[in-house]
Image (cartoon, rainbow, N blue to C red):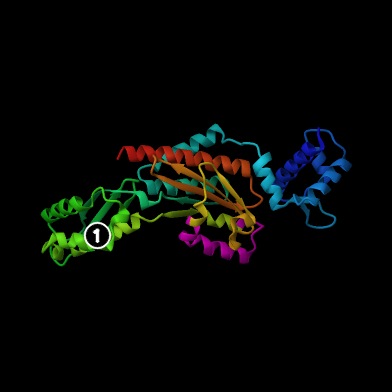
Amino acid sequence: MEPTQRKMKILEAVVEAYIRTGEPVGSKSLCDALDFSVSSATVRNDMAELASIGLLEQTHTSSGRIPTELGYRIYVDKLMKSAPLTKYEQNYMNDALYLSSDAPEHLLESAAALLSKMTRCAAVAASPSGERSVIKRIRFVQTGGCTAMAVLITSTGSVKTRLFRCDYVITPELIEMFEKTINERFAELPVVGVTPAFMQSTAASLGEMSMLMSNVLLAVKEAAMEAASTNVTIKGQSNLFLMPELASADGKRVMELLGHSGEISKLLASAGAKASILIGSEINNPALANLSIIVSRYTAGSDCSGALALIGPVRMNYPKITAALEYTADAVGKLLSDLLEGG
């Protein structure tokens, strides 16, 4: 075996041993784990060379070695072997997701909950951006004598509701009139097209009816604004507190970050079609300096895509967690496609 190839095998073994145990890896224990014969002295020398080029580090003089961020990066990019889900895990995931596939919001919430449970990481699910979606239909449901609810449905399957009140009694005939009038003006309109200027022109086109429907129009506008945004669901945040790598001060900063959906959306924005892995400082966010994030996109049609992500320690089981994330993203994309095609 060539020296370079041997060193890469040793790096791979160190990373996987450290992921498994959380303990610095010594040359003697590493010799027992390698699938080729080599002396302890040779392993020691190779580990020292790997440390000299920044792939391993020694936390204490007498301790073994642990991977550096660069060591993890080389492992993820060049050495990591695939670890597909078992048939049991696939069936479990498929069944649970299918039971939640009645609406996109339920499906994504279920996906995040399942991923956090399977991986013991914090899981994030981001809905498809509503910026390219189109209003398919707006329904109105009476909820009281003077109250009703606007239900806005988009081309990405998003359903947004807004309650409104009128200063007159709402009848079934008025509900029918609301639906006819509003859908004539809003159906097939991009949600981002519901601008103040559009609302003013719509109100003007209604003439005297605009006074009767002022709260109706306001409810539709608010529902459209929400539909245009990206919804972020986070599950399993408490898993992060069980990680010894995360000190209490760091944990507080992480929780604060996870509470800002806009910041999380930015982190997910760089994901490609396959899983994208950012390690420690690569995330470029001080709150996540001791963590890694794996992001994978799901797609449903040409104009509908979102992202799933897992946040965990730098010392995470990258092969298994990546496999779980990619499988889930693929399953979510297929179920969401079926949901949208079925109306």
Density class for disc 1 (Cα within 10 Å; few <14, some 14-19, many ≥20) is: some
In the rendered view, would you say 164 is above or below 36? below
Q: Nearer the viewer, residue 198 or 155?
A: 198
Residue 261 painted magenta:
yes
Query: Can residue 130 be seen in this snapshot?
Result: yes
Q: Is residue 301 magenta?
A: no
Q: Is residue 26 left or right of residue 289?
A: right
Q: Nearer the viewer, residue 100 or 82?
A: 82
Dominant secondary-structure state across the stretch colored magenta: helix
Quadrant of the frame with the C terminus: top left
Question: Position of 163 compared to 284: left or right?
Answer: left
Q: Amino acid at mark 1?
A: Phe
Indicate the quadrant where residue 14 lies: top right
Q: Residue at x 47, y 48 (%)?
A: 307
Q: Position of residue 39 (x, y in %)?
A: 87, 38
In the figure, is residue 198 to the left or right of 114?
Answer: left
Q: Nearer the viewer, residue 110 or 79?
A: 79
Image spot of residue 160 (x, y percent): 31, 54
Residue receiving disc 1: 198
Magenta-colored span: 242-265
Of residues 118 and 70, the one drawn nearer to the viewer in this rendering: 70
Secondary element at image label 1: helix
Q: Is residue 41 left or right of residue 255?
A: right
**Residue 147 in view in this figure:** no
- The x and y percentages for residue 189 are 26, 50
Residue occupying image coordinates x 53% and y 56%: 237
The location of residue 45, given as percent across then percent down, is 86, 45
Q: Residue 7 appears in which quarter of the rendering?
A: top right
